[in-house]
Image (cartoon, helix red, strand yellow):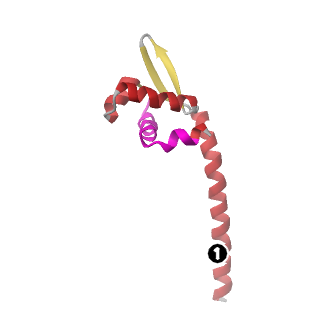
Amino acid sequence: MRVFHAVADEKRFEMLKLLQGGARTVGEIADSLGYLQPQTSKHLKVLHQAGLVRVQAVANKRIYHLEKDGFIVLQNWLSSYIQRWEDQLDRLDAYLKEEEE
């Protein structure tokens, strides 16, 4: 899935963290993270194609925002693992209580 590929890259993950603070232009993202602008644009394109960011054109600037709906795929995937671990921990807890008796 594109979403997992997009967030697997450390630089793109840093961009997502930066955008949590609000919308930014490509130049602002590049400057904040110390990346070159062409490199930043390339990574933002991957994030956009994955549905994690949306772009707004204002004059000659491109402003990037987090796209909430894009994170639903990640949330659902993580939720399934969280439930699995909670079930396993509940079974372990029940087993340990039986052993104590």
Position of the N terminus, as image quadrant, is top right
| Rendered image quadrant of residue 22 | top left
**Which residue is nearer to you in this view: 1 or 70?**
1
Q: How far from the left and from the top, in percent, is residue 65? A: 49, 28
Tell me the quarter of the image containing the C terminus: bottom right
Residue 10 belongs to magenta span: yes
Residue count near mark 1 (Cα–Cα under 10 Å), binned few <14, some 14–19, many ≥20: few
Report which residue position mark 1 lands on. Answer: 92
* Residue at figure coordinates x 39%, y 25% from the top left: 38
Please determine whether, in this image, residue 49 is positioned above or below residue 56. below
Place of residue 88 in the rendered image (x, y in percent of width and height, measured from the top left): 66, 68
The majority secondary structure of the magenta stretch comes to helix
Q: Amino acid at mark 1?
A: Leu
The answer to whether any part of residue 73 appears in the image is: yes
Q: Is residue 40 left or right of residue 93?
A: left
The front one of 74 and 11 is 11
Residue 47: x and y, percent?
52, 32
Compared with 34, 41 (above or below) is: above
Hey, which quadrant is residue 89 in on the image?
A: bottom right
In this view, which residue lies farthest toward the top? 59
